[in-house]
Image (cartoon, rainbow, N blue to C red):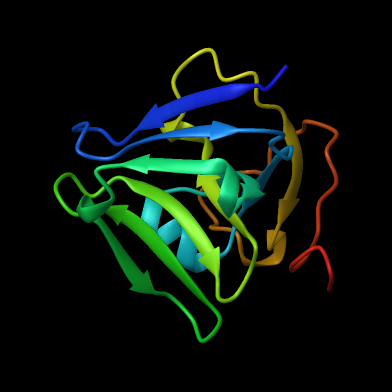
Amino acid sequence: MMVKKSGRCLCGTVSFVTSGPLEDLTACHCSQCRRQTGLYYTATRLKVANLRIAGEDGVRWYRASAQARRGFCATCGSALFWKEDDADDISVLAGAFDQPSSLTMGCHIFCDDKADFYDLPDDGRPRYPGSRGD
């Protein structure tokens, strides 16, 4: 059975449906994610081919670094996607999914760059000072 999950931005201009497996959530505590979302960025990842976007003309892409860009709704500003250049997968922000999402936390990355106004959750999940590969 193909599992499908749906979601959207705050105003509904951009909506999406995923099919196939979703990775456990990654919480990124880097300064870029904090500045974009106000706290930290929690997202799942899936194959680009398994993501269907309605209202795609409402998505704006911001070049966040030399290797990746961030997608958001041009109308309401909701952060929705993160995509590394030439990658076969895309990250979708957990908060954009409709409930119940059935998503589960996997790990925390860039913990050494987290803001000083909160503590990392004591959820027993792996924590990495940088990316998982560092």
Location of residue 116 (image quadrant): bottom right
Residue closer to the observer: 30 or 3: 3
- Quarter holding the C terminus is bottom right
| Quadrant containing the N terminus in the rendered view | top right
Tell me which residue sits at (53%, 24%) in the image. Answer: 5
Above or below, 120 relative to 84: above
Instruction: Name the residue nearer the viewer: 120 or 125.
Output: 125
Instruction: Indicate the position of residue 94 as horizontal and vertical percent values.
Output: 53, 35
- Regarding residue 118, the answer to whether it shows in the image is no
47 with respect to 69 (left or right): right
Q: Furthest-left residue in view?
A: 75
Query: Residue 120 at x, y = what percent?
Result: 68, 43
Q: Is residue 10 left or right of residue 108?
A: left
**Nearer the observer, 49 or 98:** 49
Question: 32 above or below 95?
Answer: below
Residue found at x 44% / y 20%: 98
